[in-house]
Amino acid sequence: MNSPKECNDNDDDGEKFQWHRSCIDDYNLLDLIGQGSFGRVFRSYCTVNGQECAVKCISKQNPQTNLQKIRTEVYIHIRLNHPNILQLFTVLEDSKAVYLIMEICNGGSLAQLIAKQKSQNSIRPILPYKLIGSLLLQICDALDYLHRNSIVHRDLNLNNILLQRPYCSKSSTTTKIKLADFGLAIDQRLMSKHRSPSTTTINHQPNDDNDDLFGSTICGTPGFISPEIWNQIPKSVSSKSDIFSLGSIVYACITGQTPKNDIILDNSFPPMAADLITKLLNHNPEKRLEINQIKQHIFVIGHIDSRRLNPIEKTTNTLRMSIDSKQNVRMYFRNDNLTIDVYQNGSLINIHHNHEEKYNFYDLPEKYWKHYQLIIKFINLVRSKTRKIIIYCGDWFKQQPNNGKPTKKFINKCTLMNDGHFEINVYDRILDENQCYRLDEITANNNNNNNDNDQFDFKPHLDKLFKLYSIIYQLEQTLEIQSETIGIDLFPITIGCDSMKSMNESNTNTTANNGTRLTENNSFLTSKILRSIPINGIGHAIQFTNGSIKVNFDDGSDLCMDRDNRIYYLHDGILDRFHKNDKLPDFIVDKLAQIPQVIERLKIS
């Protein structure tokens, strides 16, 4: 998780945040896209780099303008870096105004989307439940990032949730959002410093400004303000205040109205939505849901997506799970003698117990939620193993930039999985086997030092991998839209030629030194490292769980023996393979003479 930069406690406020001295003439202000009490927002573009952006203009001549509060807003906002938070690029200032240069969202606000949908449809829900669940998940991700960094937004409402692109119900079931406007946000770490009499970092005005620093003033948007803020309970404002606002957002997405006083959830609310709203709008902050509980709530998780999943059947001691050729899902719970059938990607549910019951997903009774969550886990597991886009990389990753020679290991294909993860396949030319890594895990471990000589080094390839991922992601989005437009599912797809398959087919027609054909399957399958040790005077030895032994010799060559005594030898980018009955070259015999010593060292390690 990216976190805000730390502050220097020894700096005063003027030194802590430096206004960027630059000319607003570098930006062409086009049409007005937003307006509030303290400023106006224009769609703009930068004449220096040609990038589109949004510019928030805050007049210094407005008597309501408080430059100290603007500094506080910028101090918080400019440090944030999250895909669901509107990015503040820089701040400009002249004698007339302060200008916040921000990321632009062309889809309007959530308030505008609800108003548009409400005018077209007065029947609840105003927004589709699936869309609401997707929006909630993104808002939760943004709030989780803020709260982990001790920041409380305090003004979470429909106008401050922006859509990156216009939403079209005919071509998409979701849309990407950005959380905006940090004018009322507070940094609780800064609050704790101010509570200490020995620490002063910002020269605030007395009374209202100081109260607002500690979150003790009434602020926010009516209908979204938590009870503790309304009642001005001292030192009570926390991340739980944002959770209350989130409950109001869910209510508004369903009804098209802002909740007032104690709301009554009638039968028009499905059980899942009523349960979630009730737990979010609890007047006791301590009883409101945590972020991780919201993300795991059955309403937010939503109904299953079994599209593109191949038929499968699994059985455990307590469960029998299956997906048929039409992507219908069945799960039998032995202990409860209960069977649940799920049709139309989770929209329809049949339950067989003592009698048959039929439900739409969002009307599913609470007593079956835990059963259904097990079905969701099963589907997500299958989705994580199902390929969506496969791209063979050819020679793009195969050559070393320093000497141009082929590497022992190289990236030969990448795969976008159905659950959104991006997998990188590394081929080992010695073992003739593949290992899969996830891009997010590679990034997380990028700064970790690994001394294992057999570990693949991704650092030289990260820029290419991110570029490839960006291309594949854009392709996926385009094909998803085209699939819905023409009514034909275009996934899964494969791009490029499988060079390893071609090489293996070529190898079946290749003879060894004595003319023997290598037609056997020489795959080491998915073996894992059992032991890995350095040996003085020889090199580095590795023993695998399938019995194979590999030696990285000090002269740069590699020799591997599998349990069938087949030998693989790599030197200067050339791979030689020998069958156990082949006559071996002298240099291979010399290498093999050191194997007994290697085996002995591995045994005692």
Image (cartoon, rainbow, N blue to C red):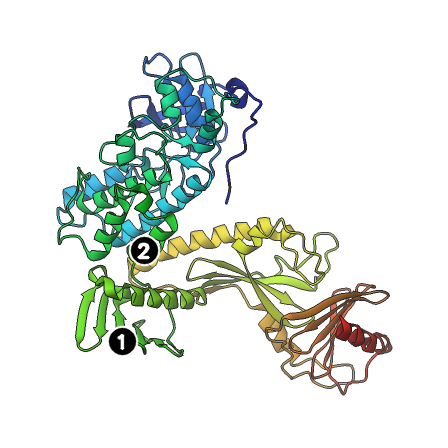
Taking the spot 78% from the left edge, 81% from the top edge, the residue there is 513
Question: Dot 1 surroundings within 10 Å: few (below 14), some, or many (20 or more)?
Answer: some
**Circle nearer the N terminus (2, 1):** 2
Q: Secondary structure at mark 2?
A: loop
Taking the spot 38% from the left edge, 73% from the top edge, the residue there is 310
Residue bearing the label numbered 1: 339
Q: Position of residue 9 (x, y in %)?
A: 56, 26
Q: Position of residue 253 (x, y in %)?
A: 23, 45
Decide which of 246, 498 is in the foreground and name it.
246
Q: Secondary structure at mark 1?
A: strand
Q: Quadrant of the C terminus?
A: bottom right
Disc tally is: 2
* Disc 2 to disc 1, C-alpha distance: 22 Å
Disc assigned to residue 297? 2
Relative to 52, 287 lies left or right: left
Taking the spot 29% from the left edge, 57% from the top edge, the residue there is 485
Q: Amino acid at mark 1?
A: Thr
Taking the spot 78% from the left edge, 76% from the top edge, the residue there is 599
Is 332 placed above or below 419 here? Answer: below
Q: Amino acid at mark 2?
A: His
Q: Position of residue 604 (x, y in %)?
A: 77, 73
Relative to 329, 477 lies left or right: right
Question: Dot 2 surroundings within 10 Å: few (below 14), some, or many (20 or more)?
Answer: some
- Whether residue 225 is visible to the viewer of this picture, yes or no, is no
Is 257 placed above or below 17 here? Answer: below
- Whether residue 538 is visible to the viewer of this picture, yes or no, is yes
* Contact between labelled residues 1 and 2, with CB atoms less than 8 Å apart: no
Query: Which quadrant of the structure image shows residue 74?
Result: top left
Q: Position of residue 441 (x, y in %)?
A: 54, 55
Query: Which quadrant of the structure image shows residue 65?
Result: top left
Is 121 placed above or below 352 here? Answer: above
Query: Which quadrant of the structure image shows residue 361?
Result: bottom left
